[in-house]
Amino acid sequence: MMDALSVVSQLRDLASEPQNREVIVQDQGCLPGLVLFLDHKNPEVILATLQTLRYLAELSPNIPTMKNELGMMVSLENLTGSTGLSTDITALAQEVFDILSAPANPLPRTPEREKRKKSQFFINSSNKKAKSVTLHIQGLDSIAQRGLCEEALLKVRGVISFTFQMASKRCTVRIRSDLPTESLASAIAATKVLSAEQVVKNEAGEEVYIPLNSRGVEVQQNSAIPDYLPEEEDSPEKEVNKAISRTTAKEDSSGSWLNTAASFLTKTFYW
């Protein structure tokens, strides 16, 4: 059964793939539904919604449509001024608001400008020098453990961005293509309370967990934040063990997950 968090989390995973972003924004149900989710009672739903919007805004032709969506800018502005939400939410809401409000031809990004994004850690999800991995993290049971995991990942040189799915104890991490996945497992194991396995699909399309060697793996640490990757238009390299995500939203309209999600979004006005 679908619920708000599972729908917006999967929509966020779709939006993380550059080829899906135009389709999502052009769908008649997704944007209105995302605006509704900005007023959700569950902070996790709000955060996942903001992360989805941040991904969608990576595609500059999407910005006018998103900005003009009824209620979008008002809801974002309300979130930035909210005192009852975490700084992660208010900071990301301000970031999305600023992107949508920016002039049509903004100044190019610089490493210094990217440093202001530390709270959510989004740095160009479409860079071809990057790959995604999905980790199942044992011990990821609370906000405190999530904080430990965040601190561990932030220290790893080559980590670009990460998002959590607390309900399934998963973390999707975007990393430089030359960073071994074992480095992530080693950094997480160093917390002494968490451990990680990689989630992949087998030949039958079933999800399986692959143990990662965390012993004796050298982890290069950051002195501040991960290295800035210059923006490029190409999609990330395809890896055999890449993170599990839907890589196409252009499916048959009668049965696609995107249309099912859009229908759920537009019909869910009360929670």
Image (tube, rainbow, N blue to C red):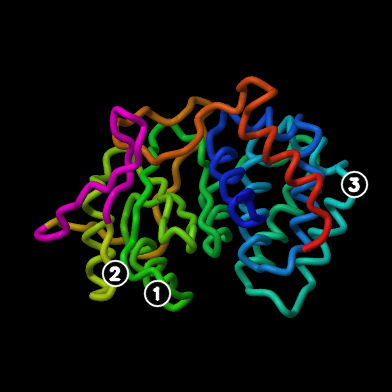
- Magenta span includes 205: yes
Disc with the residue nearer the chain's start (2 vs 3): 3
The part of the chain drawn in magenta is 197-216
Q: Where's residue 172, x and y in %?
A: 43, 50
Residue 188, by quadrant, is bottom left
Q: Are marks 1 and 2 in contact (CB under 8 Å)?
A: yes
Residue 202, by quadrant, is top left
Q: Where's residue 24, x and y in %?
A: 69, 34
Disc with the residue nearer the chain's start (3 vs 1): 3
* Residue for point 37% across, 28% down: 238
Residue 190 or residue 265, whichever sits in front: 265
Please, is residue 172 above or below residue 138 in the view?
Answer: above
Type of amino acid at the residue the image marks with label 1: Gln
Q: CA distance from mark 2 to mark 3?
A: 42 Å
Q: Quadrant of the C terminus?
A: bottom right
Is 73 displayed left or right of 235 in the figure? Answer: right
Instruction: Determine the secondary structure under disc 1.
Output: helix
Which residue has dot 2 on it?
194
Instruction: Determine the secondary structure under disc 2.
Output: loop
* Residue for point 27% across, 75% down: 193
Numbered badge on residue 70: 3
Please, is residue 232 above or below residue 122 in the view?
Answer: above
Numbered badge on residue 180: none
Rate crowding at label 2 as few (under 14), some (14 to 19) or many (20 or more) other CA atoms within 10 Å.
Answer: some
Q: Where's residue 5, x and y in %?
A: 62, 57
* Residue for point 41% across, 72% down: 141
Which residue has dot 1 on it?
145
